[in-house]
Image: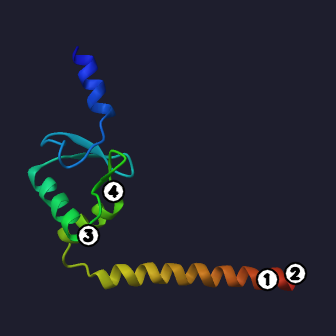
Amino acid sequence: MAKKTKQTKLNDKLSLENINVGDKILDLHDEEINITDDLIEQMRKFEKDTKKSAIWKNKVTGSFLLYKWMLEHPEEKVEEVIEESLEEEIESEVEAEENMLLDAIDD
């Protein structure tokens, strides 16, 4: 009987309504995250502020992890994260253009 209950719990879709303090949930990188009262409160605030789910496919979402990280690291500015992302994107575009030019020269 206990096995059936445990299996049913594994098959249930996880949400803020059915997780409990002490549970462990995987994140996007399959690392376990311990559920605490503070974490549940952060998840509720995240869902309220962003209208996004903190748990998807029984895993903690990346957007919630970023939100949580930003709460825990207020000294880091969002602009810095955005600038780093833009720099990487620009480098990628420049590299793609260079490759196209090299291909054109080869032809």
Q: Is residue 65 above or below residue 55?
A: below
For the point 65% across and 80% down, the residue is 95
For mark 4, what is the residue? 61
Disc 2 residue type (three-letter): Asp
For the point 12% across and 49% down, the residue is 36
Among numbered discs 4 and 3, the one appearing first in the sequence: 3
Disc 1 residue type (three-letter): Leu
Q: Nearer the viewer, mark 3 or mark 2?
A: 3
In this picture the colour scheme is rainbow
Among numbered discs 3 and 2, the one appearing first in the sequence: 3
Residues at discs 1 and 3 in contact (Cβ within 8 Å): no
Secondary structure under badge 1?
helix
For mark 3, what is the residue? 50
Circle number at residue 70: none
For mark 2, what is the residue? 106
Quarter location, residue 84: bottom left
Secondary structure under badge 3?
helix
Q: Is residue 2 above or below residue 61?
A: above
Residues at discs 1 and 4 in contact (Cβ within 8 Å): no
The foreground one among 88 and 49 is 49
Residues at discs 1 and 2 in contact (Cβ within 8 Å): yes
Q: Is residue 19 above or below residue 85?
A: above
Among numbered discs 1 and 4, the one appearing first in the sequence: 4
Q: Nearer the viewer, mark 4 or mark 2?
A: 4
Secondary structure under badge 2?
helix
Disc 3 residue type (three-letter): Thr
The percent coordinates of residue 61 (x first, y second) are 33, 56
Among numbered discs 1 and 3, the one appearing first in the sequence: 3
How far apart, in angstroms, are the residues tagged by discs 3 and 2? 49 Å
Among numbered discs 4 and 2, the one appearing first in the sequence: 4
